[in-house]
Image (spheres, helix red, strand yellow):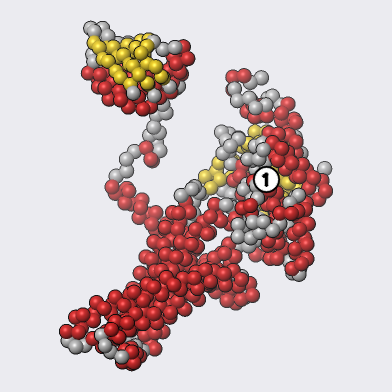
Amino acid sequence: MADLTVDHTDTLLFFAFSGRLDAAGIADVWEKAGNGLRQGNGPALAIDLSEVDYFDTAGAAFIAHLDKMALGRNWDKTKITGLDSASTALVERIRKAGPEPSPDTTAPTGRARSFVEKKGRSVADFLYDAHTFIAFLGEIFWAFLSSLAHPGKIRWGETLRVAEQAGANALPIVALISFIVGLVMAFQSAIPMKMFGAEIYVANLVGIAMVRELGPLMTAIVLAGRSASAFAAEIGTMKINEELDALTIMGLEPVRFLILPRVIASTLMTPLLTVFAILVGILGGAVVILSLGHPFVAYYNQVVGFVSWGDFTGGIIKCFVFGILIAATGCIRGYQTSQGPSAVGEAATRAVVSSIVLIAVFDGIFSILYYMLGV
Amino acid sequence: MKETIIKVEHLYAGYHGEAIMEDLSFDIRKGEIFVILGGSGCGKSTVLKHMIGLLPPVSGRVLIHGQDMITARGKKRNQLLQQIGVAFQNGALFGSMTVLENIMLPLKEYTRLPFDAIQTIARAKLKLVDLTGQGDLLPDALSGGMKKRAAIARAMALDPAIVFLDEPSAGLDPLTSAEMDFLIMDLADTLGITFVIVTHELESILTIADNTIMLEKDTKSIIARGAPEDLKADASNAYVYQFFNRNPERDKKP
């Protein structure tokens, strides 16, 4: 705790401090001292610190600040009394510690940017990012294709490990999400459809939606959250530890050594998980239909009679593309990790966001494509 | 005088076309311990990255055995890469593999040796750096000094002619740091390896270096070159004198 008494004479503004002048103490008197200085009319400031029983660097900075303010109003030199020699030396040292660096006016960061400039910059950044992303994607795709010519060079052990981690271990969460999606969709649509006595057609709805859209999409989004972030974090950490550089120096290109196994594993596991998701989703729908008193075989016949192999293949083909996108995005974002403690987290976030955006975009592209092809 | 093994010609070092070091030219001879030194942040590590072909220089070239690593492609690049080993500052050991597997990795990728032969060679490398019992540990279980030694063992896995070390004794206590110095000198003597070392540890430089160049940030150039004892005695350049005599007071120059 600190306290301040302000006193005026014709020739002097007088500040008497008491108590503890440390960081906490200054907080009590900062406003009052500033106001006192602004309202006072000088032409000199005198500070008495004889009642102060604790004084540290924060206090010294405060006193130096008051002195600077007084000088800024063209007052005479501030008189400071009541300090021991060590504290006086401290105040002097802070006062003398060179002028503060003037902001560099030539640097582009030195001035406020206009709205147009900011938008322009963010568009330019976005285009640059898109450019590097597409170039990298092309590099991965090329490595993928050329590895198909030499399958012996692929690291199958690593691929299987990733397939287990990113594929098999994702089964429970994929099953849970798909089951709930199938169940909720059937339940919500059954209520209005029952009014028309058409609740058996819920089977058609759930079947076609799961096979064509929701099965692939739900699986892809779960994998984007689960695997893309994991790949980004894994590769990002390796980058920060210079492990990627070490690989390059050993002549083991990170694209072939690290990224390809992940892309292959993800491309093969996503369709498999999707098949599983479709089945579980349709089962979720069956629960609702059964509870409405229809036999399971009726539901089964309805689904099988309505959903064609074309629908199924269309859904599964999408998944190969989603699989490549998820793994490639995760790996690229990891590879782009910058330095610093928050970089890996940032890379993982960017991986999830980018891959979900890409999944949505490509899902749209596929819808249009299938519509044009009449699938 | 021995043959030149690395030749740096008019190298402009830096990122994104902006040079932080300009027009560096120097030769490194076979079998010597060559130290690149300079203050913090002067671009030593960037120069090292150019030399090992990780980063294309702004301009100029680095020739290893007369060949340019940056422009080399395919088989030729792989042959060149087998000539060099690099131990990074924090080891850069692969965290998912044991220390022994780390050393075995380049052997597995580049040779057709059977598994037990690879393992025998890798254990021998561990012995060279005094990590005999630690092969089956994960890198996380090693201390900083052990990690650096394991990284040197991995850099030497394919018996390269040149080993690059980035700050081999940074962050080590004086005794461990001295052990590292002796290890480097021992390996240079017994195996005839050329060492290129980036460091600013004064004690190490004076102990191990046969030859040095000193980089300086302000002039963006080499401000001194030669044997470290000569640089220490040389009083003609104030910065060099201050650096070697640990005396930052500019107004007390000789």
| Closest to the observer, B92 or A82 | A82
Q: Where residue B189 appears, x then y in whole percent?
A: 82, 46
The residue at which mark 1 appears reads as: B145
Write down the chain letter for disc 1.
Answer: B
Classify residue B123 as left or right of residue A356: right
Confirm whether residue B81 shows in the render.
no
Q: Where residue A360 appears, x then y in whole percent?
A: 35, 69
Name which residue type carries label 1: Gly
Classify residue B47 as left or right of residue A115: right
| Closest to the observer, B174 or B160 | B174
| Closest to the observer, B67 or A178 | A178
Which residue is farthest left? A195
Residue located at (42% from left, 17% from top) = A91
Classify residue A201 as left or right of residue B35: left
Give the position of the N terminus of chain A as an image quadrant.
Answer: top left
The secondary structure type at the circle numbered 1 is helix
Which residue is farthest top? A10
- Above or below, A285 against A218 in this view is below
Q: Where residue B254 appears, x then y in whole percent?
A: 66, 19
| Closest to the observer, A270 or B20 | A270
Residue located at (38% from left, 34% from top) = A105
Q: Where residue A75 appears, x then y in whole percent?
A: 30, 13
Residue located at (69% from left, 36% from top) = B174
Residue located at (61% from left, 76% from top) = A151
